[in-house]
């Protein structure tokens, strides 16, 4: 059978079904589709699931990071330590508040910053550090906080990929002062677009709720629920970072399915490791000693003595009708940030960016689908 005749295998397919359709239909029939009761319910449920004190629903993870920096007191002229090995939004968020991103190196095995690399990147002007659970692999948060807390540096966890991952037996983000989450379609828990800010500080949560709605003194939900709307005041410049009840309704259903989704993804990832673990030159990311990954992205590093390079592997997969993706980008190589870190200053970051790719992995992936991927990867070594 030719590649044209074979069905395409996507790198990721959202797990959506009749429950999500019913939830959205109920919201439409209620007549209240903007931020309202479903958003409030989703916030409560998400905070409970992630063992957070407060959860604030927002339009996406980038706006969650933006609000996290603002409520943490990061201002123009401050430095914020971030990994370059991350989607560019991690570096963009400090820039939005006038701060300077300072790039830290990552660990070769996990793709995450470490206490050592963060300590090396701290400057006299560092006000915050953003750590990332890259691809769902939990960062060693306690070790980083041991470096930052004595210096009064706020640690923000970019848990965009982390829903369903664990750190020392708890959900990732549970031990963070602030954590930002993504519900993009490529994430395990999706609302189409959307995000969440969780925090252990009720004052920060209250300010984030206000800032997401133009810094209004009265929420839009309370204003619209009242027959006579109370006057509102605006104490500072805010933003339109709201989530809708339509998105939240999907999120409530997705949150209930999260344990099953993670279990399924971990089973698929385990089979990939069994079948590909002995292939010379291929290294699949795995759980670190301190936690478990949801394998939101299962990346593999391609190196000698594997006979193909990363680009050739991507081409071979594409010829077989399989969509894979290049690994995580290096933000410091992009035009807005090239002046902050020169070529070769982050060697592990650059090596992982150049040599890794993300394999297809999704809830409804069949054994036959996975066999096709495995066959392509084992083919060059006669497997």
Image: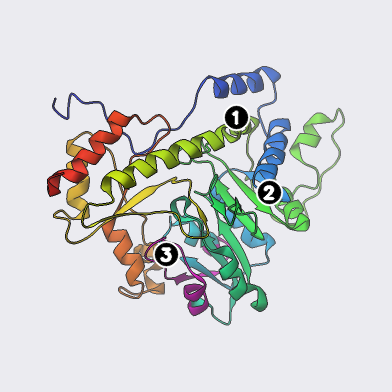
Q: Earlier in the sequence, mark 1 or mark 3?
A: 3
Secondary structure beneath dot 2 equals: loop
**Image location of residue 119, percent across then percent down:** 52, 77
Which residue lies at the image location 22% right of the left edge and 52% below the top edge? 279
Q: CA distance from mark 2 to mark 3?
A: 28 Å
Q: Note whether residue 191 is visible.
A: no
The quadrant holding residue 178 is bottom right
Query: 317 above or below 133?
Result: above
Quadrant position of the N terminus in the picture: top left
- Mark 1 vs mark 3: in front: 1
Task: Report crowding for label 2: few under 14, some 14 to 19, many 20 or more residues within 10 A (C-alpha).
Answer: some
**Image location of residue 242, percent across then percent down:** 64, 41
- In the image, 27 versus 118, the foreground residue is 118
Q: Which residue is mark 3?
A: 84
Q: Which residue is mark 1?
A: 253
Magenta includes 95?
Answer: yes
Magenta includes 3?
Answer: no
**Image location of residue 163, percent across then percent down:** 55, 45
- Mark 2 vs mark 3: in front: 2
Is 218 left, or right, of 5 in this rendering?
right
Quadrant position of the C terminus in the picture: top left
Q: Note whether residue 71 is visible.
A: yes
Which residue lies at the image location 82% right of the left edge and 44% below the top edge? 232
**Image location of residue 142, percent across then percent down:** 60, 66
- In the image, 283 versus 347, the foreground residue is 283
Q: CA distance from mark 1 to mark 2?
A: 18 Å
Q: Which residue is mark 2?
A: 51
Magenta stretch: give its range.
94-120
Q: CA distance from mark 1 to mark 3?
A: 34 Å
Task: Report crowding for label 3: few under 14, some 14 to 19, many 20 or more residues within 10 A (C-alpha).
Answer: many
The quadrant holding residue 43 is top right
């Amino acid at each position: 059978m030719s590649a044209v005749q074979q069905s395409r295998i996507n790198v990721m397919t959202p797990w959506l079904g009749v429950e999500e359709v019913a939830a959205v239909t109920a919201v439409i029939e209620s007549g209240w589709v903007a931020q309202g009761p479903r958003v409030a319910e989703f916030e409560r449920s998400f905070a409970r699931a992630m063992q957070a004190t407060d959860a604030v629903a927002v339009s996406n993870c980038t706006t969650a990071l933006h609000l996290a920096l603002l409520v943490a007191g990061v201002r123009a002229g401050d430095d914020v330590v971030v990994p370059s090995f991350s989607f560019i939004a991690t570096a963009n968020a400090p820039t939005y508040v006038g701060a300077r991103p300072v790039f830290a190196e990552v660990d070769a095995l996990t793709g995450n910053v470490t206490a050592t690399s963060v300590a090396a990147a701290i400057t006299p002007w560092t006000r915050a550090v953003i750590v990332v659970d890259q691809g769902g692999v939990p960062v060693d948060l306690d070790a980083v906080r041991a470096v930052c807390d004595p210096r009064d540096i706020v640690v923000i966890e970019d848990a965009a990929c982390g829903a369903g991952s664990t750190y020392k037996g708890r959900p990732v983000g549970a031990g963070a002062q602030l954590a930002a989450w993504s519900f993009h379609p490529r994430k395990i828990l999706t609302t189409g677009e959307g995000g969440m800010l969780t925090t252990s500080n009720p004052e920060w949560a209250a300010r984030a709720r206000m800032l997401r709605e133009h810094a209004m003194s009265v929420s839009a939900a309370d204003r619209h629920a009242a027959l006579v709307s109370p006057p509102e005041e605006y104490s500072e410049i805010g933003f339109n970072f709201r989530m809708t009840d339509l998105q939240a309704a999907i999120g409530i259903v997705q949150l209930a399915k999260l344990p099953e989704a993670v279990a399924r993804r971990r089973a698929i990832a385990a089979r990939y490791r069994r079948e590909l673990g002995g292939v010379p030159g291929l290294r699949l990311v795995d759980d670190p000693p301190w936690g478990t990954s949801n394998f939101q992205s299962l990346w593999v590093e391609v190196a000698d003595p594997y006979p193909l390079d990363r680009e050739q592997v991507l081409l071979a997969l594409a010829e077989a009708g399989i969509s894979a993706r290049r690994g995580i980008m290096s933000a410091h190589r992009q035009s807005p940030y090239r002046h902050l870190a020169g070529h070769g200053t982050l060697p592990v970051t650059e090596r992982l960016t150049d040599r890794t790719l993300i394999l297809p992995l999704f809830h409804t992936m069949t054994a036959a689908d996975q066999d096709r991927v495995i066959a392509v990867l084992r083919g060059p070594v006669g497997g």
